[in-house]
Amino acid sequence: MRKAAVIVNGSAGSGHDQDTARTLREQFGAAGIEAAVTLADGGAAIIDAAHKAAQSDAELVVGGGGDGTINAVASVLVGTGRPFGVLPLGTLNHFAKDLGMPLALDQAVRALATGRPRQVDVGEVNGRIFLNNSSLGLYPDIVHDREKQQRRLGRRKWLAAAWASLAALRRYPFLSVRLVVEGQRLARRTPFVFIGNNQYTMQGFSIGERARLDQGVLSLYVAQRPGRLGLLRFALRALMGTLAQDRDFDVLLAAEMEVTTLRPRIRVATDGEVTVMDSPLRYRVRPGALTVIVPE
């Protein structure tokens, strides 16, 4: 039988335990794959398990969890050529969806057993990998506040996120940023900067999806000084398909870009995980750096 090392986020709150591990071993076994399943407790343990898996005799390394877990495992495999499999065990599963992976667990296991390898791009900011996107401004502030409420007040994730979002909209802080995109220099005051790994659909009912993961570009989206009602206007124009024509909304594609903020250190979100980084933020795309298994 083929061998797979399967790393699942088993930290508190993820909902994945020994029953999940047993189910995965059975489903992989039925698909002709001997799976060694590791329940890893948190980010550092996930990365450590990924390093051990990459050095093992497993023919396939699989990450199971949300986008943060998938990012942690993939970051170890980037540039190695080792095949990487994705099990969508999280809430949003953006990367899995854009790969075309089934969201039902048994179907995802079968897709990994019968799929084919494909090389996809990854994004990088100051040495940190992202598979989906990176952002500054409102979103990382909301995530930081949400996590603080979960730790200190014991609130559930979605309730904490709702309170954190309301607090961020009350404050509604602006960033002053200088952007360098393929020699073009821009200065903006904005509540957010969003950088995607490849191009996102920014209009219609497919908003937030990517048609391709191998274009070799990053996509930059910046709104210029919108108020709260301005954000609503952008949302309505996106649904109507006219956002790209809005003069107060920048959309740029490039292989590299640099973002400089007034503050020397700033919170940066990468695939939903927030870290503090030094400015300037240097972004680049790494074409075909990750080998993933996708459905036939």
Image (cartoon, rainbow, N blue to C red):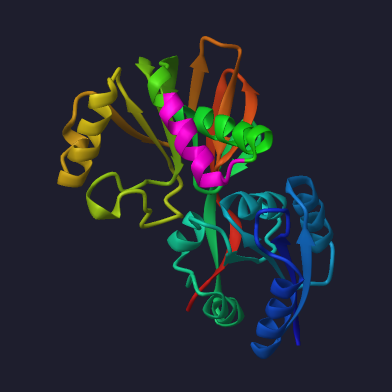
Q: How many marks?
A: 0
Residue at the spot 71% in from the left edge and 86% down from the top edge: 29
Is residue 32 positioned above or below 189 on the image? Answer: below
Q: In the shown orientation, is residue 171 left or right of residue 113?
A: left
Q: Position of residue 70 (x, y in %)?
A: 62, 55
User: Magenta-highlighted stretch: main secondary structure?
Assistant: helix
Quadrant position of residue 28: bottom right
Q: Position of residue 233 (x, y in %)?
A: 20, 32
Q: Position of residue 109 (x, y in %)?
A: 59, 78
Residue at the spot 65% in from the left edge and 83% down from the top edge: 27
Residue at the spot 65% in from the left edge and 57% down from the top edge: 14
Closer to the camera, 249 or 292? 249
Specify the segment rendered in magenta: 155-168
Residue 160 inside the magenta-drawn segment = yes
Residue 291 appears in the rendering: yes
Is residue 203 positioned above or below 172 on the image? Answer: below
Is residue 35 positioned above or below 239 on the image? Answer: below
Query: Looking at the rendering, in which quadrant would you find the N terminus?
Result: bottom right
Q: Position of residue 207 (x, y in %)?
A: 30, 49
Residue at the spot 62% in from the left edge and 42% down from the top edge: 129
Residue 172 appears in the rendering: no
Residue 122 inside the magenta-drawn segment = no
Quadrant position of residue 195: top left
